[in-house]
Image (cartoon, rainbow, N blue to C red):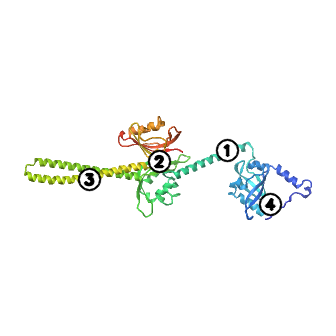
Amino acid sequence: MPDSAASLTSFPVDLHAAFPADDLLAMVWDASSAPLVLLQPVWDEGGREVTDFTLALLNEAAQRMLGQPARPASTHTQLFPNLAANGGLDFYREVLATGQPGRRELKYPLDQLENYCWVSARRVGQGLLVSFTGPAPELGSAGELALRASQAREHAALAEAERQRTILLETFLQAPAMICILAGPQHVFELVNPLYQQAVGNRPLLGQPIREALPELAGQPVLGLLDQVYTTGETFRANEMPVQFDHAPCQELEMRYYNFIYQPRRDAREEVDAIIVLAYEVTEQVRAQQQAAESKRQATVANQELATANEELQATNEELRAANGDLFVTQLTLQELNQELEARVADRTSRLRSAQAEAERQRARLERFFMQAPAAICILDGPDLVFELVNPGYQALFPGRQLAGRPLLKALPELAGHAVWSSLHRVYETGATHYEEGILIPVARREGGRSKSFTSTTFSRRGTTRAGGLTASSFLPLR
């Protein structure tokens, strides 16, 4: 490597005796108002490449500017990790390798805030002498202090906003629901969580308009509803809506059912710039309901056929009693007719029992679906809202409390006077399904335990009368 001269080559020779170099160097170093730093290279194990620099010594001005002691224990990269990205480390390596002085504008944390300043470096012996100048205003002025305080608040706010954004993103990605964000009037996929990706198959979505990414939606209501929400800015909700996705190429579209919400997202000007989609697949529940309805229809038909058979039997008996013909012939005819009718009755009775058994099987299946549902669900019965049925997901929210068979206010007395109690009673009295979004419900998970906030989203009455009770679902803890 080239080496710079150790003597003061630009200092007049006739002044060397009056101003000794060692004394002059120490005086200039201590008195200089310009920040000065001595850097020593850190070589790799083979001694071929400079991997970093140590800050061998900082004068007082440099200590104030960089907020470091005279001899920091950490290396340059450890103290200023962002400098390598803007070429600072390469700049120092080049000056050390060539021996040619250099000057470059670099971003340093001046007084703990990042600002650009001019950095001059020249090789001295086996290291570098680095000085800092402008364009930042003089440290310590009232305007500078106010500016730096403002910048500090801005940096803190930006850091907090980034932290919140990261938390929100992780929440979306880990949520037990299908979530995506569609940006702009073309509904371009901006975010897709794993459950949404799984629902539509393994194909690229991010950065593509929904009409191109999911062409099978053409002709289905989904695209029109998205346009409507983006244009009007009004939230749209749907329950058990059929949607057909092409889960695998060259296969027939499969009909599935979803409960979903299209929520408009607004920018700083309060204008809609995207739509947030939140969906749950309810295909199994819908198919179970359809099967139960078909079983009920078949049972109704069987009952009607049985009633008809009974009417026919009664008419035949009337005819037999009214007949005065040949008693023997009449008895034979009656016997044959009775046998035929009994066979028909036996056949239809057997079919009725089979239909009733199927209906019971479907009822048991619906109960299993209820108990195995991934959401927290309960059924409250009567005006006192007694816990008639509590699925495991709901009971898991209150592992230390007895719910089943107890009135709501006996099991969870904390709800007395809370808005959720009024909402539940209103659903029971009116039969109208009620949605709550983000309502906080302070309830202890165990008897005598500390209250914890929950949210409840859906209350609906079971059946067409108040005697049917009501169902509450999506009762979730806030973490």
Which residue carries the number 4 mark? 126
Quarter where residue 386 is shown: top left
Q: Secondary structure at mark 4?
A: loop
Q: Secondary structure at mark 1?
A: helix
Q: Secondary structure at mark 2?
A: helix
For marks 3 and 4, give the one nearer the viewer: 3
Q: Residue at x 52, y 39 (%)?
A: 449
Residues tagged 3 and 1 counted as in contact (Cβ below 8 A): no
Which residue carries the number 3 mark? 350
Gap in angstroms between the C-alphas marked 4 and 2: 70 Å
| Image coords of residue 248 (percent x, y) | 45, 62
Q: Residues within 10 Å of mark 2 (few under 14, many from 20)?
A: few
Quarter where residue 409 is shown: top left
For marks 3 and 1, give the one nearer the viewer: 3
Gap in angstroms between the C-alphas marked 4 and 1: 41 Å
Gap in angstroms between the C-alphas marked 2 and 3: 58 Å
Q: Going by the picture, which residue comes out furthest to the top?
A: 417
Q: Is residue 109 visible?
A: yes
Amino acid tagged 1? Ser
Amino acid tagged 2? Thr
| Image coords of residue 234 (percent x, y) | 47, 46
For marks 1 and 2, give the one nearer the viewer: 1
Which residue carries the number 2 mark? 232
Which residue carries the number 1 mark? 150
User: Is 274 situated left or right of 99 in this image?
Assistant: left
Q: Earlier in the sequence, mark 2 or mark 3?
A: 2
